Amino acid sequence: MTPLQRYLVVSTLLFGVGLAGALTRRNAILVLVGIELMLTAANLNFIAFWRYGPNPESAAGIVFTLFAIAVAAAETAVGLALIIKIYRHRRTTHLDQMDTLKG
Amino acid sequence: MEPAAFIAALLALGGAVAAVSLRNLIHCALCLVLTFFSVAGLFLGLGAEFVSFAQVMVYVGAIAILIVFASLMTRDPGADPARVPEPRAIQPWPLGLGIAGAVTGVLLACVGSSRLLPDVTAPAVAPSVRELGQELMTRYVVALEVVGLLLTAAMIGAVVLAVREPRPLDREVGR
Amino acid sequence: MAQTLDQLLDLVQQRLVALWPAPWQPWVAAFLGAAAIVATFGGLFALTTWLERKGLARIQNRLGPNRVGPYGLLQPIADGLKMLTKEDIVPRAADQWIHFLAPILKVVPVLLAYSVIPFGRHLVALDLEAGLLFFFAVGSATEIAVFMAGWGSRNKYSLLGAMRAIAQLISYEVPLVLSAVSVVLVAGTLSLPAIVDSQAGHGWAGLANWHVFTPWGLAGFVLFMIAATAKTNRSPFDLPEGESEIIAGHMVEYSGFKYALFYLGEYLSLFAISGVGITLFLGGWRAPVAWLDWVPSYLWFGAKLLGCIAVFIWLRGTMPRLRADQLMNFAWKFMLPMSLVTLVAAAMWHATATWTFPGAGLWRWVLGAALLLLPYRALSRSLTQRGRLGPRRYRFAD
């Protein structure tokens, strides 16, 4: 295996764990944790491709990762605010119990 | 992969598995912190110093703390006993696990069999922080502005969503 | 001679490293650097506890510790022995692992932060290109440690204290970073030794070119130091451990050596953040006037650090503790806007650096000062008039 492939395997496994968490857990916060893991795996992919790619002197991979980190921060802030709002309303963070569209 | 990177990768994966599988929410969040630190270590090993520090600062300093705060503010009293869960035809979690396993398997097969991946082992010359700043301010300036706008909008949105309506007494006193 | 004295520590390290076989040398060098930092700042920690107790006592018209050794100088040793011999109590309900890991996680990042601070000419353990970012990134790890201590103890005072502490740390991190960014903007680098180099030379009347001697630099320095006081939980921002309210906050369930580690971590982070403040605004290890350049650089750094510590002790002896709402209002409604204004003033200063017409220096000063003073006046007026930062009006008490 080339070094690039090793890092890709790590990031794939990280993505798989995140996906499994997001699909199987019922707590909304843990679903968000799974999504964060998937985003981190994607960042690892970007950096690995930047490092072992054909032209590492370009900054595109790094810049893309920086933007992804910023977007992840925004996503978490809004997601958690929504979870807290729903919790105040329905006293639960269980996704199975958030099944009505009526407030 | 050097031994240090191998250990970091193992820690990252172990932390990730613990973060999505433990019962206690706070333990999950702390394991997530472990994963974020290890991934920052992987970035450092790959030569992306700036991204590694930014990762620690944003993920550990902000996102993990937010998750911890949210889990403390939403203590789930447990499933509502008044609501009888409807019997399901399919249990959801084996299905989710199956989908995740299938996706991971396909991706792993792709990574393993791909002929397109470049095999570069030469040491990379990371762009300096100054070059990175130049790039951000020239070539990627529109994206930078959009991200700034997005962060502002997200911050205002989060505040508006999470703010409590003032109680009557608070309004009377004026704070 | 002066140069030899200046590089004395470097020379000693090189001699010691040369004694070892070649493959071991990088490890020995790294170990020596780390050991020197730990020993120096551990010693400074002991000295500072004594200085603080003496200084506070003098401010409060007392004598302070005077039983152990001359002037009570051996008091830190007695304190240390007491801490080490105390029983280490872990609450039965506590989360064992988290309770155990929290003090370690508090101290280790702070020690890591020392690796990027230049203590003298060529006297920096790691010259990272993104050194300042490293410092702030490592600093954000202490928030997790505080949370672990508060939550792992399973005590309501611990948890309340930890929540207070984290809210405070996050709120004051924003002005802290923003005021440092204004220096980065002018110096054009994130590496701390390079920032020190950007303050080289002497300007008007032989005064050094330190950033603190510019309008934005003065404002930035004051903001940075206020935010640093809050970041290190020191009075008047010591709400997280306010003894009269929540006993010791997140540290209430810790005793013996673990408590000593927290105590050590707080003081070490105080020194580290003062060191970064000195590097950013006070010219790092540089002498204030040209004819004092012969004094070794690390002595200048040490003198500035001791000066900062004295100011922190003075503040602690003088200021009453803030209330939680005052703390938050101050951070978000005053510190944050003022640090943004400072950033604009720094940008103005940077943009007008090319002015060459006669009297340009004066004009830059007037413009910069006006840019800072007008928003300051407007902000402080609007905040105090609406009673946001003033004394609380009790509805049922008057």
Image: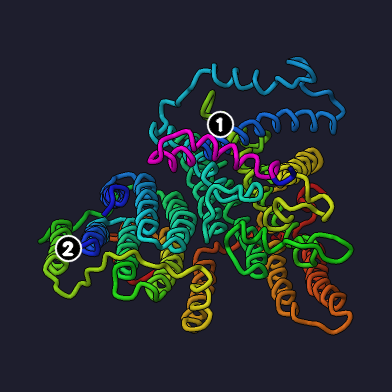
Q: Main secondary structure of the magenta part?
A: helix
> Could you say where residue B8 lies in the image, as x and y percent from the top left?
32, 50
* Magenta run includes residue C10: yes
Labels 1 and 2 within one chain: no
Pick whichever, C168 or B93, lies toward us.
C168
- Residue drawn at (66%, 29%), measured in percent from left and top? C46
Q: Quadrant of residue B96?
A: bottom left
Q: How many marks?
A: 2
| Amino acid under disc 2 | Thr
Determine the secondary structure under disc 1: loop
In the displayed structure, C206 sits above or below C295; it is: below
User: Is label 2 in a helix, a strand or a loop?
Assistant: helix
Which residue is tagged 1? C252
Marks 1/2: CA–CA distance: 46 Å
Crowdedness of circle 1 by 10 Å Cα count: few (<14), some, many (20+)?
A: many
- Quadrant housing the N terminus of chain B: bottom left
Q: Is residue A81 above or below residue C104?
A: below
Report the magenta residues as a range: C4-30
| Left or right placement of residue C85 versus residue A17 in this view | right
Q: Please say whether residue C300 is one of the residues in the magenta stretch.
A: no
The answer to whether the residues at label 1 and label 2 have Cβ atoms under 8 Å apart is no
User: Is residue C126 in view from this perspective?
Assistant: yes
Q: Is residue A60 left or right of residue B121?
A: right
Q: Pinpoint the chain carrying mark 2.
A: B
* Label number found at residue B104: 2
